[in-house]
Image: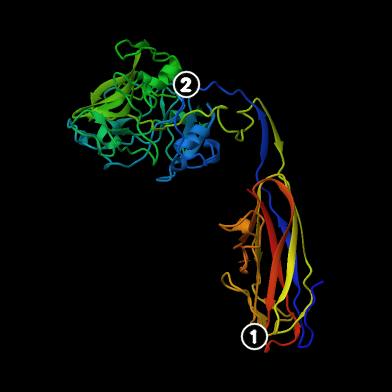
Amino acid sequence: MLKINTNFKKYKIPILTILIPCIGLILLSYLTFIPTPTSAIDTIDPNETRTLMQIDTMQEMTEQICTNTKENRTKQLKDARDSKIYWVAKLKDGNCWMTQNLDYDGGGATAAPTAWTNSWENATYYDPGNYVYTAPSEQIWCNVEGSAPTTLVPCANEQFKWVNVEGKEASKDPNYDIEPSAIEYNSHYHIGNYYSWMTATAGSGTNSLANAPSSICPNHWMLPKAGNNSYNTSGSFAYLLRQYNLATSDTNGTLISKTNAIYNHPLYFLPGGRIQNQKINAIGSAGYFWSSLGGGSSAYTLFMNSTVDPSHSFNTYNGMAIRCLIKGGWLPNGGLDEPLDANQANLSITVSPVISIDATSGMNEAVDFTTVANGNITATVSSNQAYQVLLSTNQSTLEQNPIVTNQSIPMISTDANITAGTRAWGIKKTNSALSEGTLGDTTANTLFSPIGTNENKVLFYKSANAESRTLTFPVAISVDSTLTPGTYSTMVTITAVGI
């Protein structure tokens, strides 16, 4: 029990507490195949432990996150520039690739078909609209050979057509029934945009053969490499296809016959044709994808028709597709453990998140203006995951009931000492919520802090792991000599949230 000097006027200052346990993460246990590492790369940030499955945007991806990710993991990420969503996968070459075509409307002015000129300096792109390929493995594209992009229309035969999914969020939904034809499509097969090489390189292409230093890929991502000796170069089309036995030559002098495997899981390359001389050509029979290597009026591409050529040179003013990648590597154990969904794991169970909390306050004593009332709020938390404890109140002042005008004890507004003879109250954080000190140690933290108001909750403790622990939050309250006698109180809400 807290003992208070009783030689002066007495004020009862109870602080009542309630608890709101919050649901945290869903934990999964699983068994899965871990592939044999086939390459290695220096890591960038050894303190980064996230994987592809734990990020939401393209721009969050780093080389270390890709390295941490196990082979064959795949997820849709948002491009923060325009909120379009793309499938991304960690592939056999150890790198993370977009597995659908880039659809970013940037890097140059949108051009009408007549704006495409036979000039390598020309920087432009063309957006044909939201079209998808209905069945790439069967090569059943609409025959629009030689058509201007603006005249692209669905074929008359309902079974062989491009499907216009304008307004249907094509790149979000991997299986959407398009009405009225009700043909299902996979968003890996969204056609995306056609880009000139100068647009693809964000205008950084040069007049001499070199890898362009920039691209219109999202931040941290890059165009693939190419060239005659790229079969042993990680980050190139040739090296990637070699891992899937789709490019077996040690030079690009000998090409292999194309198989439909290049269209299917996990690569999803499309025979989307190209824009050449202001016309769409080779739709359904050939695919073209820009690399970063070029100079003057030509640049290298992945080109596929009856054969696969991962380093074929074309004029830079052609309009072609883009697939971006981010370099990665292999961890010794094949990647960090990460949550899977039931479709990715061959065995999965769901463990419900558990956070239980029991909070009390023993402050219900009399206080006078010559002293500071000191007490504690204690909270016992048991959790099967790391968690945070946040404090808030919907009434920042200690008030009488009924409320008396100008007779209240305000909460401090910044971290501060609380001295006798002033109206103030605050609660100490544990140092695990600060930038210094040892986890759970409060001795170095001598200041009291304000707590949050309403939904603006303030962090007061953060655990390193799952634990069962009794936390103590010291409380201090002071009054001045003008405060009228009475009982002053507020409600402190203690929230535990899984992280």
Q: Is residue 203 above or below residue 9?
A: above
| Amino acid type, callout 1 | Asn
Instruction: Report the side of 49 relative to 106 (left or right).
Output: right
Disc nearer the start of the sequence (1/2): 2
Judged left or right of residue 151, residue 440 is right
Dot 2 amino acid type: Asn
Where disc 2 sits, the SS reads loop
> Residue 406's mark?
1
- Location of residue 323 in the rendering, given as x and y in whole percent from the top left corner: 38, 30
Q: Characterize the local packing of mark 1: few (<14), some (14-19) or many (20 or more) Cα atoms within 10 angstroms.
A: few
Would you identify the image quadrant in which residue 476 lies? bottom right
- Evaluate whether residue 130 shows in this view: yes
The quadrant of the image that shows the N terminus is: bottom right
Q: Is residue 134 left or right of residue 285?
A: right
| Residue 450 percent location from the top left of the image | 61, 69
Q: How busy is the neighbourhood of tag 2: few (under 14 within 10 Å), some, or many (20 plus)?
A: some
Alpha-carbon distance for marks 1 and 2? 73 Å
Residue 173 visible, this angle: no
Identify whether 478 is placed above or below 386.
Answer: below
Query: In the image shown, does 464 or 26 lie closer to the viewer?
Result: 464
- The local secondary structure at tag 1 comes to loop
Looking at the image, residue 27 sits to the left or right of residue 266; the answer is right
Q: Can you tell which mark lies on residue 264?
A: 2
The residue under the point 64% across, 81% down is 423
Q: Which mark is residue 127?
A: none
Q: Name the residue at 74% across, 70% down.
A: 375
Q: Observer-nearest residue: 93 or 313?
A: 93
Query: Whole-percent x and y of residue 12?
Result: 77, 79
> Vertical placement of 341 versus 499: above or below?
above
The residue nearer to you, when weighing 160 against 131, is 131
Q: How far across and down, in percent of the image, does residue 146 sit?
A: 26, 24
Q: Quadrant of residue 109?
A: top left
